Image: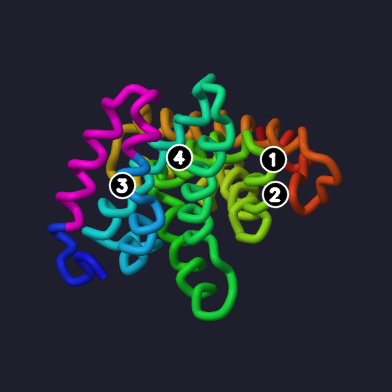
Amino acid sequence: MKFAHYPEIHNNVLIILYQITNYLDRANLVLTAEKLNLDEFKTNFDPYRTKLRSFCRFLNNLHLNILSNISAVAKMNSENKMEREDLLQKIMFDLKAYYRNSGNAKKRLEDFKTRKLYEVETHEVITRIAVNITKYHTLAYSMLESYFYDDLIEYLIVISQTNAQGKDFIQEVSEKKKRDVEEIKKYVLSIVENSQLIFIHIMDLEDVSEQFCNIKVFLKIT
């Protein structure tokens, strides 16, 4: 597996890919994604996936931001909707890999959720990707096969609460991570706004179960 034992090299590659996808116009994103080969991109990242300790946190954030940049093809008005959906499906598979909840993956998911709680940038970029994915009903349904929607609701509930010291989530994260309150607030507001859009997309689906879209919980906390 490429770069499995060389995280610094993998990091440099991701930085380059992030710069490329961050400044490309949407018309060229499809071609770039094809050249990148998103199936291989996903597989090569598996050794680092969900690991948010020290250096791996930067790797995960870069990987997710690249996916977010490419997922912007969902906003294109081109006629080739099938091509865009195929591309977004590959991105969805990559995102779902973060939320496997069976077998050996269950422990990794729990560790990921615990560490991600205070890594607001990580959760924010995940919601950005999901906004674009859930525009397509088949992809929104497919995400049901992972723990993503449960995590989305759980995170929103935490955001709405205060801790034992009476501090809200933004204050708590700011103090724990030693970062500016306004910076944290920007990410948290984006998380809430993106979550609203995801739920709006879900509401368009037929036969939506309560587990899939607990609107009462969502409205209460936003």
The region drawn magenta spans 10-32
Which residue does the numbered mark 1 point to in the structure image?
A: 137
Circle 4 SS class: helix
Task: State the residue position of label 4.
Answer: 124
Measure how far apart labels 4 and 3 are at the Cα level. 24 Å
- Spatial separation of the CA atoms under disc 2 and disc 4: 21 Å
Look at the numbered disc 1 and give the secondary structure of its residue: helix
**Toward which corner of the image does residue 17 lie, by quadrant?**
top left
Res 215 label:
none
Which quadrant of the view contains residue 184?
A: top left
Marking on residue 36: 3
Which element type, helix, strand or loop, lies under badge 3?
helix
Would you call the spot at circle 3 few (<14 residues within 10 Å), some (14-19), or many (20 or more)? Answer: few
Q: CA distance from mark 3 to mark 1?
A: 25 Å
Instruction: Give the residue at x 75% y 45%.
Output: 213
Q: Are marks 1 and 4 in contact (CB under 8 Å)?
A: no
Q: Residues within 10 Å of mark 2 (few under 14, many from 20)?
A: some
Amino acid at the residue labelled 2:
Tyr
Magenta run includes residue 135: no
Q: Which residue is mark 2?
A: 141
User: Mark 3 against mark 2, which lies toward the viewer?
Assistant: 3
| Image coordinates for residue 119, horizontal then vertical, percent | 38, 49
Closer to the chain start, of discs 2 and 4, is 4
